[in-house]
Image: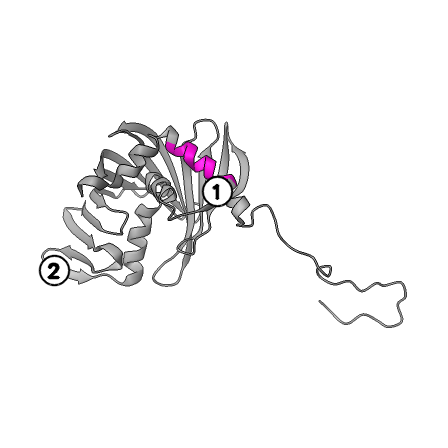
Amino acid sequence: VGPGRPDELRGLVATDLLPKGFDPATQNRPTPENLALADPWLAQARAATGGEEVYRRLGGFAAKATVTSEQGLVSEDAVEWSPDGALRRTRTVLGQTVATALAAGGGRAVETMDGAEKTLSPRQATLLRREWLRHPQMLLAAHQRGERRFRPIAQRKAGDREFYIVEDVGDEFDRLRVHIDTESRLIRVVESWEQLEDQTLVHIREEWSDYRPVDGLRVPHRRRTTWNDGQLVSETQFSEWRLLDRQRR
């Protein structure tokens, strides 16, 4: 930065930006040993919410929820989700009902309102799928199946709670991080970066709470979603949540 070094100055020593042979590896680098540090925390989170056997049965869920935005807009949602990417959602807002259907494996994606059907763009479909891929129970089940791996990032306090934070090492999400309560072993926060259809990059933080027993699991029934530190805020309150058994699908 700035002009070159004056030749007449004495005593100056030129240095490289990084010393030769420097290896910028940290404890967060996704090595096999590093990944193994995060695995017990995910296993403990499963144990705290039902155990390994019920997660082996978990083949998605069906739920009903009320979603309220900070501006007061309210929608009633009925959702059926499968980890293979199949989604059926019926959303009623301001007296109108919109039905969304996404086929498994990234297939056909359509929205229907007042009898008119519209094909969703690949980006719109991806964002809808990722909303439910980020659900705490879906993340824990995917980790159990070996479809998702995590590395440790940090351990820090927030208020009266301490969290162990792990980050997904796959290339599907951009910095998907899971905050596990070190005392209860419950997932309290899931955060990631998402690219919208107009290429805008947003930070999404989902705070999960109100864990209740459902079909052998403990499932959060409240989600507070924040975009870009408060740009958009909404709250989802689940009135129903039902496990879909893999063996019966």
**Residue occupied by mark 2:** 116
> SS of the residue at dot 2?
strand
The quadrant the C terminus occupies is top left
Identify whether 97 is placed above or below 136.
below
Residue 83 got which mark?
none
Q: Please, which colouring scheme is shown?
A: one colour
The residue that appears at 27% across and 51% down in the rendered structure is 84
Q: Residues within 10 Å of mark 2 (few under 14, many from 20)?
A: few
Identify whether 101 is placed above or below 178.
below
**Which of these two is toward me, 202 or 164?**
164
**Marks 1 and 2, Cα distance to the nearest angstrom?**
43 Å
The residue that appears at 46% across and 51% down in the rendered structure is 169
Magenta range: 37-46
Q: x, y percentage for residue 22?
A: 69, 57
Instruction: Say left or right for 94 vs 35.
Output: left
**Residue occupied by mark 1:** 166
Using the rendered image of the protein, determine whether residue 63 is visible from the camera's viewpoint.
Answer: no
- Is residue 40 magenta-colored? yes
Using the rendered image of the protein, determine whether residue 55 is visible from the camera's viewpoint.
Answer: yes
Q: x, y percentage for residue 181?
A: 46, 32
Give the mark nearest the N terminus, 1 or 2: 2
What secondary structure predominates along the stretch shown in magenta? helix
